[in-house]
Image (tube, helix red, strand yellow):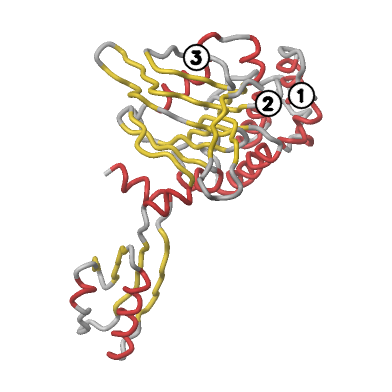
Amino acid sequence: MDYTIELAYTLNKPGSQIHLLAIDTNQLTKRYGDFQAVNSVSLKVREGEIFALLGPNGAGKTTTVEILEGHRLKTSGQVKVLGMDPSENSTEFRSRVGIVLQETGIEQYLTAVEILEQFTNFYESPRSISDLLEMTGLGEEKDKKVKKLSGGQKRRLDVAIGLCGNPDLLFLDEPTTGFDPSARRTFWDMIKNLKTDGTTVVLTTHYMEEAEYLADTVALMNHGKLVTQGSLSDLKISHNQTSITFKLDESSAVLPEDIQEISKISKGMVLINTESPTSVLSGLTGWAISEGIELTNLEVSRQTLEEIYLGILK
């Protein structure tokens, strides 16, 4: 495979690795007149990972993905997708990239298997229909007309269509919008299985829980710029805030001055965000024991991806 190669290593540390890049952009820029929709974005997506691109509306992520898919031309910068320039829209590029749009508009009066027969005919070496049905869990619904499928089943069919050409790379745009929690979790497990099968997945979503559950790497865009990119663990380490919450039952109790300074109190509930949870908890529990005060509903938690996301965008 003609992928870009990133040599990632740490000096004096065993286990150096060579990572193949499915996507590599350098200073990618897109302008519309004086408006810069994408501003010098450099992304690296490793082969075989699930990569989540996040950002508020107008952040530039849709334009970025459309350039990567070959649907929009860049103004400047370098773009390689599977080692190819997507703007050339070659037959090889189209055969190796799958795209699942937010809305596909497929024929409602055909059955699931008839839809897949149509789309597999577009490729020289398609994935077998039986594999597609098994991968997406649509085996029992294969003879149902599309209009009879549930919302979750239709979305699974969309993914099956995107996989017809047996792509190395799959783009997923807001894949679980409108799903109930159970259907969303089932869909997530299917996407995880794609990774196990060796498919690289680029995901755009507004659901932070979805990105946290699925993604190996997360990138956040805002105002056309790449704000941060890294693994979830790296992001959580770099935004090392721990939340401590509890209910202060004693109305006359006064928190120690050093804890008051870092606390937010509302209707008897106390919230402390700290980078030194062990020290704060030691002081807090020591004070409570000495005063004979119960810290009701005491909880300690690391920041979620959503909290990190909102904090970065402030």
The residue identified by callout 2 is 163
The residue identified by callout 1 is 127
Give the mark, 1 or 3, whose residue is nearer the N terminus. Answer: 3
Give the quarter of the image for residue 6.
top right
Horizontal and vertical percent position of residue 267: 25, 70
Q: Disc 1 on helix, strand or loop?
A: loop
Nearest the eye: 129 or 52: 52
The answer to whether marks 2 and 1 mark residues whose Cβ atoms lie closer than 8 Å is: yes
The residue identified by callout 3 is 71
The answer to whether marks 2 and 3 mark residues whose Cβ atoms lie closer than 8 Å is: no
Give the quarter of the image for residue 82.
top right
Q: Residue at x 62, y 41 (%)?
A: 187
Name the side, left or right, on which 183 lies relative to 252: right
Find the distance from the CA under tag 1 to the CA under tag 3. 24 Å
Give the mark, 2 or 3, whose residue is nearer the N terminus. Answer: 3
Q: Disc 2 on helix, strand or loop?
A: loop
Quarter holding the C terminus is top left
The answer to whether marks 1 and 3 mark residues whose Cβ atoms lie closer than 8 Å is: no
Q: Residue furthest front?
A: 12
Tell me, for residue 189, which label it has, or none.
none
Find the distance from the CA under tag 2 to the CA under tag 1. 7 Å
Q: Residue at x 64, y 35 (%)?
A: 150
Q: Is residue 194 above or below residue 24?
A: below
Q: Is residue 82 above or below residue 199?
A: above
Label 2 environment density (alpha carbons within 10 Å; few <14, some 14–19, many ≥20): many
Q: Residue at x 73, y 15 (%)?
A: 118
